[in-house]
Image: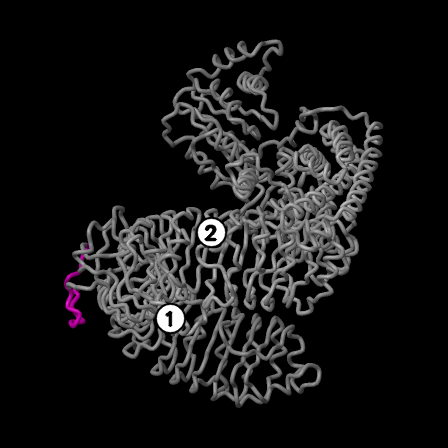
Amino acid sequence: MAEAIAFDLAVELITKLSSFTLSQIGLWWNVKDDLDDLKSTVSTIKAVLLDAEERSVTSHHVKDWLEKLKDVLYDADDLLDDFSTEAFRKDLLGGNKLTKEVRLFFSSSNQFAYSLKMGRQIKAIKARLTLIGSEAKMFNLVERDRPMETSFMTKKRHQTHSFKDNIIGRDDDKAALLKLMLEFESEENVYIIPIVGLGGLGKTALAQFVYNDEMVKNHFELMMFVCVSDVFDVKIIVENIIKSATGEAPNQKLEMDQLQSQLRGKIGGKKYLLVLDDIWNEEWEEWVSLKELLVGGAKGSRIIVTTRSLRVAKITSKCQPYVLKGLSDDDAWSLFKEIAFEQRSINPTFVKIGKQILERCGGVPLVIRTIAGALSFKETEKEWSSFKDNELARISQNEGKILATLKLSYDHLPSHLKHCFAYCRLYPKDHKIHVQTLVQFWIAQGFVKQLNPSQSLEEIGFVYFKDLNERGFFQEVGERYSWEGLTCKMHDLMHDLAESVAGTESSIVDSNEIASKVGEKCRHISIDPSLIVLFKGKKLRTMLHFPNYERNQNMNDEIWDFIISNYRCLRVLELNGLDFKMIPRSICKLKHLRYLDLSGNFNIKILPKSICKIQNLQALKLNLCWELEELPKKIEKLVNLTHLGCEDCSGLTHMPRGIGKLTSLETLSKFVVDKDGSRDGADLSELSGLNNLTGRLEITNLGFVKNAKEKFKAANLKEKQHLRLLVLVWNDYGDDDDDSGNDDDDDDKSLEDLRPHPNLKELFIGGWRSDAKFPSWLSLLTNLIVIRIWGPSNFKQIPSFAQLPCLQKLSIVDLTLLEYMDDNSPKGSQGEPESFFPSLKSLCLENCPNMKSWWRKSSIDDDNEDDTTVIGTSTMAFPCLSSLEIVNCPLTSMPLYPSLDDDLRLVKTSSRPLKQTMKMNITSTTPSSSTSSLPLSKLKSFHVHKIEGLDTHMLDEYLKHFTGLKKLTIGDCKEVDLGGMQWEALKNLSHLGIINIPQLVSLPLWLQHLVQLKRLEIWNCSGLRSLFPVFQHLTFLEDLLVSKCKELELSAAGLQIFQDQTRLRSLALENISKCRHLPEWIQHLTNLQILSLVDWPNLTSLPDEMRCLTNLQQLNIHEVPQLEERCQKDIGADWYKIAHIPSVTHWPAVGYI
């Protein structure tokens, strides 16, 4: 990537050397002339860099020259950063109150010594640059100030080979496009359809597939196909359109207006189809200049645009682009097989190897064709295996078709995006990338340029990410959980491309061999921490540690000493989850550091004060440092700090005074109020000016605030418009319920004075022990998506959230005094149905034992449990609720939930709302089948436990309607007889749990209808004697757990109930007290991978049949005393029976398998 980086580095150096700040520094240390000479030298070399960059593609000598130059430019950048950092430290720590250390450093003698040192280093850099500049003369490089259209920039894309009658796996895509072309009615005469996808996916082939369809040929009067490629020259495109329409190239001497006239004559008034293949242009004006020439077609005309960029798609058309995806596994195999086995019979061994190779191809037809073509010439199994194990890892470098297609996308990136993309090489393949963290890495490395002062660096960085994503460099982009933020992944081929363009500058160091091979010039690594001491490069700017490496218990001061001694140029250091107990004072020597992540080091109790000398630090991540007691007192010295992550730092006792001076902070995940003031901690007023905060802010120990009304207002939450989540906690987690030590009047602590900005998306309120009134501002937070309230608290009622238009998730937990949710009656609060919780998807009511009704005044007689007469379409119901959980809340009346389609969990509550819901009618605007409109017919998961009034007939009738059910758990329902039920309707059930049903003697016959059942759990069914004969019909079963069934007999002579269970992969048996040994039938579980035996007091040995379980990967044994000695490795009497099992452990508990 030297060719992309060198020019940017030179530009950045010249910018720094031209700055007023550095000029003043030069005067201060008497090195201004040296800096000016350096600037002149860099400027001279920069003038030829664009030419060198483009010529490096074809000249190895030029590429090597650029590598050397890049290395010197990096060293120069480090030197200037060192220079600026020292000057900044002087300015920050100096002033009128110089510390002894600062006075010593900036004494005249030390200043003279430092200036001499810097002068020597600047001259050394200049000498190296001068030598490299002289070497450039042999290449005859040309001075240029902008890129030119050379063969490098305009290289022709590989011409797609001729159209075939059939393209594997694209029938559905073709059908969708045909519908858009032949059936869709567009308001515009000429409708444009963009096809977007990665290089090699077959966009051109699909366009040809459609273009050559007979229906298409008969539908359009005129058809044209033009390959545009990367040079978007309107004149050339028009010439090619005319050539495609007429079969003859127009006269090359024609001017543009003549060509326009000729084009309009050909397409005017005709219903035409034009394919513009492989468009790269992202300039809207240039596209418009072409589009204006094409609008003269008749109604029904179509233009198909193929591109790799979503941005191009958006520019060319208002319609939703058709995004082409990779082939399915079956289609990919069909294509692979067609090519690889064309000249040979299909051998099962070759098939196995071929499918393993195919996994690497990512469903990309170009890659599949290339690799399968290479394999078609290999005749032996040994050659195929060698290809898989050796050559496959290198094919992306040796076979031009694979990466050359993708690299064309990279070549077209602006240089700043090239840096950003290549940096992603540090992530392991298939790693989930947290986009915000990635952007922060880019910022720390200086890749992100703040050209617009109104945008933060992080906002600009997200624009960079969006640009790369729209060009197809990332996939699976989305936000699954709000707390996780935006995530993405890279296709394996894109990772290969990143690795290729990054070259020797970046590396993933995960073996001793790689650690010893990586060169001195490597600047960025992600590394297994145990290999750090083996890595010798001293110019590192990035050291990352990813959680796929095991936690290392041996991280100690020696590791820190090694890092600090050897990697002084680090900008990014990520050492999370490594069990460090302390951070050394010498960390301040890493003065270039911008990003430091120490998250998940549970045992760190304190940070060294010296960390506040790292004035360049922008991000300090301390999340999940549970034992951390305090932050450094002089934290306000970190004036560049924008992110301070201390989420789940439960040991924090206070925040340091002065934290409010960090006005650039965008992340402050936790603010802890000093309980008794003994630690001289910051008070809430220090939050007043931190109005750039984004994401999450958790404020704890609010119950200990003195002068609460004043301090709550002083926090100025109403001005923090960028916050997404606000967490207000009365006492920090783990505090006792009583408020010992808090003698302030609780009545003074009102939520009213903690009013947030209306942009807030999520609000959590925990353990509020003060006034039992909710604030008036709650109804103004119309953007709220999530509300979570938990106790202990004094709330007896909470406000109606029913009118909040965006609320999707509501959770009420441990409000033991809560009596109702709504002050009105059902009729009084109903209003318009569409305004009653219009967006609510998830509702959780847990441990509210006094809440018997949703409404304060119910119109239904709660004493009459059978009163379900006031039921119908007018009854109040949640319009779009998807998930409902009611645990230990004796609710007898509440809004109903007929449209629930995800999860229903009812524990220790009344069955009445369920009965009423099941009697409802559901109106639908679209026709439906007889069951799809029934209440709860789309429910996927149903858990029912200790429900009053639920009997066998009722449950049986309900389950007949639950035709979409995948998971069912029935527990402790005394009036339910499972044996008397007919559940044929549950044909899609894949997970069944039966808990504490003592009357169950044998598995019910209806289970044999559950042919899709994959997991069965049976807990605490004390009367269960046998799994036979039903069990033998559950041939799809993969996981079985049986626990605390004291009468169950498994080892009776001749009972071989598991003979047909060849799919079973996990078996857990706990407390089967009647069984004295594992029976012979265990040998039939040939696919078993996990076997767990827990609490078998009478089990004395393992059977010889254990040796038949050749696929067993894990044997867990717990509370089986007589097996402990017999299963000792190598020496136990039973060891020979289980020696083939990779993992044999003494498990702490059965848990879930």
Residue under the image location 17 percent in, 60 percent down: 825
Look at discs 2 and 1 and give the one toward the viewer.
1
Q: Earlier in the sequence, mark 2 or mark 1?
A: 2
Q: Check the picture and name the quadrant holding the N terminus.
A: top right
Residue under the image location 44 percent in, 63 percent down: 700
Query: Please, what secondary structure does the residue beneath circle 1 have?
Result: loop
889 drawn magenta: no
| Image quarter of residue 32 | top right
Callout 2 touching callout 1 (CB < 8 Å)? no
Provide the residue designation for mark 2.
695
Provide the residue designation for mark 1.
743
Query: Please, what secondary structure does the residue beneath circle 2 have?
Result: strand
Judge left or right: residue 1151 versus residue 992: right
Judge left or right: residue 385 versus residue 866: right
Circle 2: is it few (<14), some (14-19), or many (20+) Cα within 10 Å?
some
Q: Is residue 421 above or below residue 793?
A: above
Q: Position of residue 359 (x, y in %)?
A: 61, 52
- The amino acid marked with disc number 1 is Asp
Q: Position of residue 1075 (x, y in %)?
A: 50, 87
Circle 1: is it few (<14), some (14-19), or many (20+) Cα within 10 Å?
few
Q: Which residues are magenta?
A: 860-873
Q: Position of residue 88 (x, y in %)?
A: 65, 45
Res 1138 seen here: yes
Q: Is residue 694 above or below residue 1032?
A: above
Q: Position of residue 471 (x, y in %)?
A: 56, 38
Compare residues 754 and 364 and report the one nearer the observer: 754
- The amino acid marked with disc number 2 is Gly
On residue 943, the disc is none
Q: Is residue 1148 above or below residue 187?
A: below
Tell me how many marks there are: 2
